[in-house]
Amino acid sequence: MSRLPVKKTYKLYVGGEFPRSESGRTYEAQGANVARASRKDVRDAVRAARGALPKWAGMTAYNRGQVLYRIAEMMEARRSEFAELCSGAKEVDRAIDRFVWYAGWADKLGQILGSSNPVAGPYFNFTIPEPTGVVGVVAPDEPPLAGFVSRVAPAIVGGNATVVLASETSPLAAVELAEVLASSDVPGGVVNVLTGNRDELAPVLAGHMDVNALDIGGADGQSEELERLAADNVKRVVRGLPDAESPWEIASFLELKTVWHPIGV
Amino acid sequence: MTDLERKQDRAPVPSSWEYAPAPEARDLVQLRDRYGLFIGGDWIEPKETYETIDPSTEAPLAQVGQATPEEIDVAVKAARDAFENGWSTISPTERAKYLFRIARILQERSREFAVLESLNGGKPIRESRDVDLPLAAAHFFYYAGWADKLEYAFPNRKPRPLGVAGQIIPWNFPLLMLAWKIAPALAAGNTVVLKPAETTPLSALHFCDVLRQAELPPGVVNIVTGDGRAGAEIVKHPGVDKIAFTGSTDVGKAIQRELAGTGKRLTLELGGKAANVIFDDAALDQAVEGIVNGIYFNQGHVCCAGSRLLVQESIYEPVVEKLKRRLVTLRVGDPLDKNTDVGAINSRQQLDKIAELVAAGEEEGAEIYQPPCRLPEKGYWFVPTVFTNVAQSYRIAQEEIFGPVLSVLTFRTPDEAVEKANNTPYGLSAGVWTEKGSRILAMAQKLRAGVIWANTYNRFDPASPFGGYKESGFGREGGRHGLEPYLDFE
């Protein structure tokens, strides 16, 4: 008699845990039943992200870099699973290498994006990049894995915490990645992954008053509405590219702080 | 008690002390009766006009244009034309030289502009002379040098200009904000349509003479005047590639909404409710001077004003006492008098807003202190005000007043100071006063604001990026970072 396979229940990833949607809803995608998050799930995820922020932002850059590298290590171990959930092995390799690439940026950002400023007065004046806070990410539908990684890695390497709406049509790679994140060293709440209906969820994220920046890279026809909602608390709006890697992608999730430190005896 | 302390503890300087008036010569400025719109290098006779006044006397100064949508359209087209036919392709070194020229002419004509700024805006001549003008000129000088070095500012990114920048500036530092906007825009190779604030158009209009003197090609900078309607037309105009706005958070949000889905670039420099944090080891007299400069500078019409004073509980009494004593010595009056510390409120509308919030502060239960002070009969004035016993929930601790009104709160531990300081939707600036360098840096790290001043306040420099976190806006002005909003990259 052949063995009955143990099938996975695809759940949300919020605050380091895997809850079902509080609404109890699911939808079908990629031949599986996937959790269909509700507005309340979005709000819970924002709260989890806000809670995770101080620890993540307060880590040393070296440490954050290592945590990102660890994600790549864990992904590498699941290459074949990932390959089945996205466009294939090439996309998986690209996603893994992208985490490695961003991992190396953690402790270089300040040197590339900051400055010391020669002001006319007895002050040591310098500008440093800092995380902007909670970033809402509307991940692109395609590519489902590399798209997710391309939007999330630059946000978290700078010390932000994220709430990510995964690809609506192909959400399984994102759920798989959530399992990787849960078993790596990323503190719970730094990346929260929601699956479900983008038209329903993205506006809640865009209008949320405790979200500081919004990446609408995967928003398609919804962009205008989301941008308008983002203005309610002057969110930084990032029109992220679905499959790019660049330090300027990181910069768009950072604030610049300028300090005037007195020089004197 | 040391001898010095005893001396400092003497009774306050009597407010009856008289200074002989020391007015700056008003005839340094030749005002015209009527100003046009500066479009394509020419003065265009406006269809509609309004009167601009001296807020310290309410006396009319001149008629200026209220730009109509058609006139804004002509200005945008002039800017587009100048961008496409010359300015974006001119050698960057030549571009730099125009900016250097502007800086030099401003330095040369600084007395005239200082008077104009005080006349139309109400700010003390001491400030327009020593702060606004030198900084405006320095800003042009600083960005002039960047014009032909953009590839070094952004290596491997192939920087190129955006096109036409629409710029809308506030009334608190009219010429300085113009410099903050125009200098980086031109250095990056853009052309400009700029609208000064409704109440303070004159320095921007006189600046057009500077542009002509510098022989800047026609259409590279166009100045259109008017109220918010004219600003809204600039924001909406499809021929504008980028909007840079400095002003209130409400208007900033409206602009962000308006631009949704257009792909136009946007930078916003909005309001603030900055905390000025005084620790018990601070040099108190120096700190008190800093508090006064932080909130009464330019009548408190400063987006980064230190409007919430956070005093460590152990030094609350001496700080408040010294502060009150210092307030008695502030001279409120004629903006053109060189002795004046606090000038006129910029407009009737602003005066009403300040009065409304101060009334709310008294009603909510805060204790008000205003030094004895005789205000001129005409014009818009407000006595420098301190509120003590302020709870964090009071409107005067939450809302931007944009006037000479300070709210005093207390804290016990550095963590409490950080929590209170950050407890606001704004995040433009903050001040820290302590003799301990490591504490300065620890606080600087934790305060969520774009500019942190330590043992100083309200200090600006063209090399130093300025701009906010959270609802204080996004984008930076000043420094290398200030070029970025005006450039496109590969």
Image (cartoon, grey):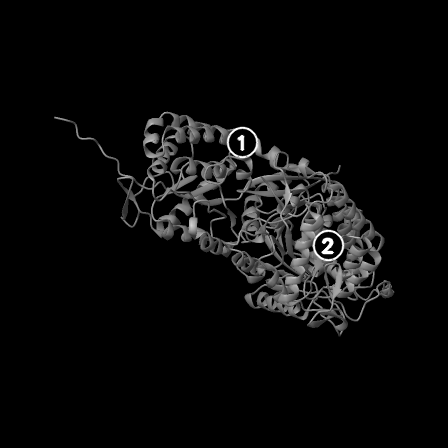
The image quadrant of residue B129 is bottom right
Q: Amino acid at mark 2?
A: Leu
How many marks on residues? 2
Visible in this render: residue A38? yes
Q: Residue furthest front?
A: B85
Q: Is residue B62 left or right of residue A116?
A: right
Mark 2 lies on residue: B176
Q: Secondary structure at mark 2?
A: helix
Q: Is residue A82 left or right of residue A65?
A: left
Name the mark on residue B488: none
Q: Is residue A147 left or right of residue B338?
A: left
Mark 1 lies on residue: A105
The image quadrant of residue B395 is bottom right
Between marks 2 and 1, how big is the CA–CA gap?
37 Å
The image quadrant of residue B219 is bottom right
Q: Secondary structure at mark 1?
A: loop
Q: Amino acid at mark 1?
A: Trp
* Residue A63 location (% of width, % of height): 50, 29
* Residue B299 location (% of width, % of height): 71, 61
Q: Dot 2 falls on which chain?
A: B
